[in-house]
């Protein structure tokens, strides 16, 4: 009933071959496009946090979300994936406030809202460029 499995086969090489095939033939994109016009399934997830280092729980939550989308795709739904991005303003603002020793809205206004916003942008992008996310 089942074919015999070659025990000398490299599972790592097989995985790399399959991934290369999928990439070369754009299989994932085709799987989404071929279901266009069918019932739509949207999965809205929160964006990654731009401060702090990622942990294993981030990987696990991403895996669970991916499984749901793949399942719905296999059930025939049109499941376009569109990643969102948000730098989670409040945690970034709190980090910048702390680094500038600001403790009130009045102090932020005195410092300058435009300058403060620029420091927040720099903080978020520094975290990204340092590979913490």
Image: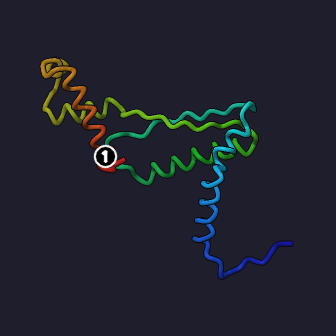
**Where in the figure is residue 88, as x and y percent of width and height?**
36, 33
Q: Is residue 112 above or below residue 57?
A: above
Label 1: which secondary element: helix
Q: Is residue 34 above or below residue 110?
A: below
What residue lies at 48% left-to-right and 51% top-to-bottom? 59
Colour convention: rainbow
In this picture, residue 133 sits left or right of residue 92: right
**Where in the figure is residue 4, as x and y percent of width and height?**
78, 78
Label 1 crowding class (10 Å Cα cut-off): few <14, some 14-19, many 20+? few
Closer to us: 24 or 63: 24
What residue lies at 66% left-to-right and 46% top-to-bottom? 70
Image quarter in which the N terminus is found: bottom right
**Where in the figure is residue 65, as x and y percent of width and height?**
57, 44
Would you identify the image quadrant in which residue 11 lies?
bottom right
**Where in the figure is residue 47, as x and y percent of width and height?**
45, 37
In this picture, residue 64 sits left or right of residue 99: right
Closer to us: 112 or 90: 112
Report the residue that reaches farthest toward the right: 1
In this picture, residue 129 sits left or right of residue 73: left
**Residue for badge 1:** 129
Closer to us: 127 or 95: 127
What residue lies at 43% left-to-right and 35% top-to-bottom? 85
């Amino acid at each position: 009933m089942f074919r015999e499995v070659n025990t000398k086969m490299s599972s790592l090489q097989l995985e790399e071959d399959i991934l290369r095939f999928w990439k070369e033939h754009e299989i994932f994109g085709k799987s989404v496009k071929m279901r266009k016009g069918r019932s739509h399934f949207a999965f809205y997830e929160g964006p990654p946090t731009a401060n702090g280092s990622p942990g294993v729980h981030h990987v696990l939550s991403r895996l669970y979300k991916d499984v749901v989308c793949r399942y719905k795709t296999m059930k025939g739904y049109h499941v376009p994936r569109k990643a969102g991005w948000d730098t989670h303003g409040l945690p970034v603002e709190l980090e910048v406030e702390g680094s500038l020793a600001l403790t009130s809205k009045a102090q932020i206004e005195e410092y300058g809202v435009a300058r403060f916003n620029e420091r927040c942008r720099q903080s978020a992008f520094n975290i990204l460029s340092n590979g913490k996310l």
